[in-house]
Amino acid sequence: MGQIQHQYQKLKFEYFSFLEIERCKSVTKGDIRAYVGLRTWMYEFDEIKSGNDSHNSHIAGFERAIEDFSREIKKRNLLTAINDMLKNWNENGGYIPRNDKNIQPLLSSPIPKMSKWKKNGFNLISLFSGALGLDLGFLATGFDLKLINDIDKNSINTINKNLPNIPCATQDIKDIPSGKLLELANIKKGEVDLITGGPPCQPFSTAGNRKGLNDPRASPLQEFIRIINEIKPRAFVMEEVTGLKSARLKHVPISERGDRELLPEEKKGSVFKVILEMLNKTGYNITYKILNSADYGSPQIRERIIFIGLRNGKSKLPEKTHSDIPEARFDLGSLKPWNTFWESVIDLQKDLDSFDTKFTPKIEKYLPYIPPGGYWKYLPDQLIEEAMGGAYKSGGGKKGFFRRLSWDEPSPTVVTSPTQKGSIFCHPESLRPLSINEYKRVQGFPDDWELIGSNSAQYKLIGNAVPVHLSFAIAQKVKELLE
């Protein structure tokens, strides 16, 4: 297994170098993904039919595909090759049967099993806990979880199922005095080591209605800061969406702005300025940055703003461990290549017949035309407008429409439903959305982490969570700061 992994690491950096568009100006990233994905599939299919195991078959196919790409790009004949392979893809249904009984994943969760974690002497109170993605990394590092808080019944039931001895505060945080939290956690004031939380972020999401802090849904963030001020833990960690940095306190439609200069509260970043003022008033030494979970070992590209506050001493963020830049091997301290979707879920492919949800017949009609790593632009010209509907004439790249994942890259940011038309999460080969177990793997949850609720509720719980590989990296840094 070690030799296989070592070979795959080298191939990933070579493939990532292809995706740097300036090196391949005659083609797009989408064309590179489609070519390498289809060529890998073609070679891997032959290897599997010859009786070879899934690990070696995929890596051998990936290696040959990269070699072919290096030759093909010089001929400037890539699009013709893609079209020829797409015909073969459609004729064979795109699906490779994998029946290895003993195949193992090449990437595991920081907590392989919930029963395997040891306490390091530091305690933790979790607010807005959700499915516990932000906190599982701390459990993996040894933090003692004393209390969780959420008002969502599926979140509470899920945590109770997996961690039945952890006290729960199920009221809205604005209705809970800090003294009550300490009582439930059985900790005295001044003895709390860490508070974590991801206050609900709808007002700051670029996909939301952009009402900023004037939206009453912003109040959870203010309540989080209240708890920090009153309990005074040694440290806190807060997670938010990147839209927080550009959100406005007051949103004014472009049609209403005219030529006048925007008021301070109408400018981009006015929300973030207020939040920083509120955080700085706590007296904590605070550092923050947008972190990409793929840079910390997650098989997913997911950016979030991470704040770390330290009551005493200088606060620091974790250093990157992975990169998509080949030169990182030499310039950035020998970073590893990003982990991929294939590494995290390859052992689950023998269960392809077990569907948690399905696409609508309309979506299923068009997806067979989409290669690994492709999206709506690979549909036949005569079908594009019909497939896209009202989105056809809208702006933007719309890359979530009829999207099929790549095996050999990290997953895009996991969404709360894999079947929504504008943010589809289609399996690289099979005509199905990602399963709940694949969602869990992409987010870094342990396999024995049980989810409570309907299938749609389970997708939502996982989709809203912080990737556990990222929270693990943060937890290791916080532990170092506290020590």
Image (spheres, helix red, strand yellow):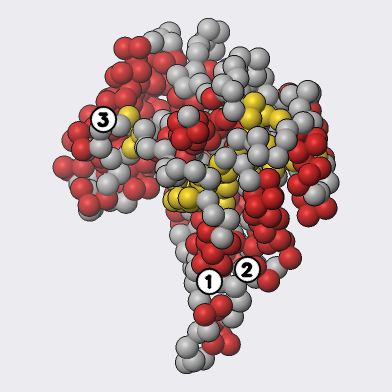
Question: Looking at the picture, how far across and down is residue 205, in whole percent?
Answer: 59, 59
Question: Looking at the picture, how far across and down is residue 448, in whole percent?
Answer: 67, 19
Query: Helix, strand or loop at disc 3?
Result: loop
Q: Earlier in the sequence, mark 2 or mark 1?
A: 2
Q: Are marks 3 and 2 in contact (CB under 8 Å)?
A: no
Q: Quadrant of the N terminus?
A: top left
Q: Earlier in the sequence, mark 3 or mark 2?
A: 2
Q: Are marks 2 and 1 in contact (CB under 8 Å)?
A: yes
Q: Nearer the viewer, residue 337 or 402?
A: 337
Residue 212 numbered mark, or none: 2
Q: Nearer the viewer, residue 366 or 134?
A: 134
The residue located at (35%, 12%) in the rendering is: 2
Relative to 444, is 299 on the left or the right?
Answer: left
Residue type at mark 2: give it.
Gly
Image depth: mark 1 or mark 3 in front: 1
Residue 270 numbered mark, or none: 1
Task: Name, please, the residue furthest toward the bottom.
Answer: 259
Residue type at mark 3: give it.
Ser
The answer for how far apart the CA atoms under marks 1 and 3 are is 38 Å
Question: Looking at the picture, how far across and down is residue 284, in whole percent?
Answer: 53, 51
Depicted 47 relative to depicted 376: above or below: above
Question: Looking at the picture, how far across and down is residue 152, in whole percent?
Answer: 79, 43
Disc 3 residue crowd, few under 14, some 14–19, many 20+, Cα 10 Å: some
Residue type at mark 1: give it.
Ser
Residue 26 numbered mark, or none: none
Disc 2 residue crowd, few under 14, some 14–19, many 20+, Cα 10 Å: many
Q: Quadrant of residue 212?
A: bottom right
- The residue identified by callout 3 is 334
Q: Nearer the viewer, residue 74 or 423?
A: 423
